[in-house]
Image: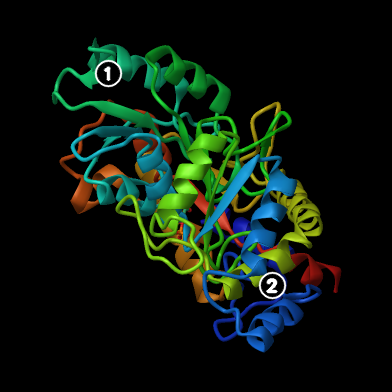
Amino acid sequence: MTQTSDILAVLRDVCGQSSKSYPIALHEPDFRGTNAWQYVKDCLDTGWVSTAGQWVSQFEQSLCRFTGAKQAIAVSNGTVALRLSLHVAGVRPGDEVLLPPLSFIATANAVTHLGAVPHFVDIDACSLAMSPSSLAERLDVIGERRDGQIYNRESGRKLSAVLPVHVFGRPALINELQAVSNEWGLPLIEDAAEALGSWVADEHCGLIGSLGILSFNGNKIITTGGGGAVITNNVELANRARHLSTTAKIPHPWDFKHDLVGWNDRLPNLNAALGVAQIEDLDRRLLRKKKLFDKYVNRFASISGVEILSEQPGSTSNHWLVSLRLLADDPSEAAAARLNIIESAHAEGIMLRPVWQLLNQQPMYSDSPHGPLPIAEDQVCRLLNLPSSPQLLESLAK
Ligand SMILES: Cc1ncc(COP(=O)(O)O)c(C=O)c1O
């Protein structure tokens, strides 16, 4: 297992000192050097801790400024942002939504929360995101245009959206996916939960389709504890999302009138204060993440049989998680090597993680419709995510 010992040597070099009692996490929050204390204190001092308050709208404005979005709606987490986006894009109970099998469970769960059915389409091995050619091929096989709608001719269900994911911060081939979706008249919703600070040419991830979502969960590049946002350039969709996220209440100084069955999705002010403090620091974080990525690329260059995944030409990754691919020809050989690497790294407190298990192999989704998934099935056993916190660079400097 010289490959394992070579990989561990690189990880020790890049991540610095670790032990079982002082582990190196995959991705940790960091509030040092930010105004987080001051902004959270303002919430406590003023009593504005809940879903109304200046930090929520400030956070939304900061997200718009950073991403270039016309509108941002801050909500309680990324899963909620997905459910809200899919709903305003027109997904209804009994519909099918096309999504990749390689994602966090929330992508499929948000579809299910609306009573719709996930339909899995293969990924491409470079971006790890939904493959535009697999989407086109799948739609050619199952798509049927009827009465101005698209149906799955096999299940009889309406196809109502395409939901690609920007995996680990590396942008999907989103313009190509958008072109296929447009051909079929299907709205594209981008799961950009992991992609704050990632761009395709000069468009921020999440803004190419009708709506995009971000997550500010504890392991993300900025965290509000828990939190998420819908971003979009479509003002009408944004207004509907905002209205539904705040119980569909008609604004009035005292009266309780609601015109739809809405949700209570809004991000609390306390959490938004943390978000504002970190978005002020985002450019610095992105620079440090790029440096850490470059360091991994450089150190792994001399190790045979592995590669660090980089972004597609023309796109910029936020390098949220740095991914290592094991290049063994035989996937089961790669899977065995990966397990050995994970066990050895965990034994010394380096918290590597495998990528997610495929969604179609989770028990809730084992009967969900899907196209052929050869690339996802091959890639899923050969990918590892490496410790990627931007603050790791500080231990490097020592
Ligand atoms: C790809 C992806 N989609 C959706 C989510 C859901 O976000 P949250 O955990 O904020 O609900 C996450 C992350 O946590 C994610 O990584």
Residue at mark 2: 30
Q: Amino acid at mark 1?
A: Ile
**How busy is the neighbourhood of tag 2: few (under 14 within 10 Å), some, or many (20 plus)?**
some
Q: Residue at x 56, y 65 (%)?
A: 219
Which of pointers 1 and 2 lies earlier in the amino acid sequence?
2
Q: Residue at x 66, y 40 (%)?
A: 69
In x, y percent, where is residue 263? 36, 58
Residue closer to the observer: 246 or 228: 246
Secondary structure of the residue carrying tag 1 is strand
Q: Visible in this render: residue 143?
A: yes
Where is residue 159, by image quadrant?
A: top left
Query: Seen in the image, is 343 located left or right of residue 257?
Result: right
In x, y percent, where is residue 202? 73, 31
**Disc 1 vs disc 2: which is toward the camera?**
1
**Label drawn at residue 46:** none
Q: Amino acid at mark 2?
A: Asp
In x, y percent, where is residue 345? 54, 67
**Mark pair 1, 2: CA separation:** 46 Å
**Label drawn at residue 150:** 1
